[in-house]
Amino acid sequence: MKKLIEFKNIVKSFDNQVILKGINLDIYENEFVTLLGPSGCGKTTLLRILGGFLEADSGEVIFDGKDIQDVPAYKREINTVFQKYALFPHLNVFDNIAFGLKLKKVSKDIIEQKVNRMLSLIGLEGYGERNIDQLSGGQQQRVAIARALVNEPYVLLLDEPLSALDKALRKEMQYELKRIQQEVGITFIFVTHDQEEALTMSDKIVVMKEGNIMQIGTPTEIYNEPTNEYVARFIGESNIFDGVMKDDYLVHFDDKDYKCVDFGFKRNEPVDIMIRPEDLEIVPRGKGKIPGEVKSVLFKGVHNEVMVQTVSGASKTVTMHVVGNHDLTNEVEKEKISANDFFMDLEDVEKLTDAEVIARANAQAWDEDDELISLQKVEYDIKSKPGTYEVTIGTAKGTEITIKAFVQEPKFYEDDKQGVGLAAFDFFITAEELKESIALDTDLCIWAKAEAWDLEKGTPIEIYDVIYDFDEENITEGDYEITYAVQGHEFKVHTTKNVTEGKKVDINFDADDLHVMSKMGY
């Protein structure tokens, strides 16, 4: 196949912002090529440079072996169909299609032959005399394409021409465009952010991100063999998680080794692993590779979309010290005061304030009418080293209570295999406070200062499960273990099976269902 277009190191900026960052791309005769990417990725800018509507800051645009950067748009063998079709409302369908030919002063009989051929090609025979406003959106789009094709360009550029159509018409026009391209036998370059359009129509897809090309390939290659997480997430639905390439054809994730079909990575190289939802199978517990629980089932028409949560991931266990309400009474002043021992991190000592001590100790005082009294006295000598320190808190009338502050080194748990960091700390609490809690799991996270984060990105991760074995309504003084866990992987599965929420299941897959990708930051 003959190479028709070459983009060589194309760079383009607007207002000091680089939109295209050295694009290199070859396009061949009779190809249907789609530039695919989100808004702002540079795909339309590249199209406009090829069409002659913009000039690149640097680089070359080679067309049929010649540099065309200095060739004006109207002299290039390239026509464009824009998102807004820009049809002439005062001209009928025939005259809209014939407009370019009349500018070239083509004879009337040749114009008639070419326009009628175009009307036949786009399935609008007999529509020549109709006004533009009498046509549907899909029909107007076909007229715009016919107007561009009637001039017999080598290349047709299409800048998101289907975006204004409804879903049903869009699907119809996807097939129609591909049919027209195959019939006229010229190169189509199509711009879209819609993955379905790209997969349906293209011979070759160019996936773009922030002015760079991420991957070039056939729809099958792009879907089944994405080069990185960005492409995998942009094309189709996917399950992606961290792993380690132990050796050729052997990848490790979720504490297990799995056979795969990928090779060529370094030994023990961190990688991303992708499994498409349709490649996963839900099987009875004990019959598959990964155990999990069905969290949700959504009917999607041709299949069910099932979310399966694997067993809990990284976790950290702390001790909750439940203490009684040991109020102290000042009979003379008719005041009562209470406060709890408390834990605190070594790193928090330097910025400790009286108000924070009162809050950590949950200290309060009240009179015989149960009206709260201001705490005026807070005495402590807590040093910046681990240990146990006395704290005295009191009122202006001398009602006091002495408690203990336990200073401890911060202890963080890091699960490198799952890429998760966890922190949670022992704490004191009264049985009454437990009973008064409205959202106990949330309060247990607050009291223990429980948090989790992604070790690679540093971003917060939700505490998924708070595990304990006590009845807060009947709890007594003592020590209780509480475990804070983050969730394991959540797998999206497309299946025609009927699955019940809450059911314990296994997930199964084959070696060729796993696709291993090089790590790449966003």
Image (spheres, rainbow, N blue to C red):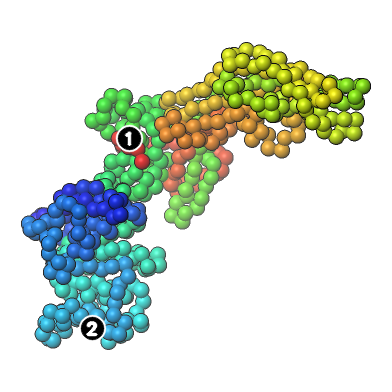
Return the disc, 2 or 1, that comes first in the chain's sequence: 2
Disc 1 marks which amino acid?
Answer: Lys
Q: Residue at x 19, y 68 (%)?
A: 79
For mark 1, does the 10 Å Cα neighbourhood hold few (<14), some (14 to 19), or many (20 or more) residues? Answer: some
What residue lies at 82% left-to-right and 25% top-to-bottom? 396
| Outermost right residue | 332
**Tag on residue 519?**
1
Identify the residue at image location x=82%, y=31%: 373
Residue 228, percent across and down?
Answer: 31, 40
Q: Tag 2, which secondary structure?
A: helix
Residue lying at the far left of the rendered structure? 65
Q: Which mark is residue 95?
A: 2
- The quadrant of the image that shows the N terminus is bottom left
Could you tell me which secondary element the residue under label 1 belongs to? loop
Answer whether labels 2 and 1 touch (C-beta < 8 Å). Answer: no
Which mark, by number, is residue 3? none
Residue type marked 2: Asp
* Residue 379 visible in the displayed image: yes
Q: Few, some or many C-alpha atoms within 10 Å of disc 2 (few <14, some 14-19, many ≥20)?
A: some
Between 124 and 430, the one nearer to me in the picture: 430
Cα separation between marks 2 and 1 = 55 Å
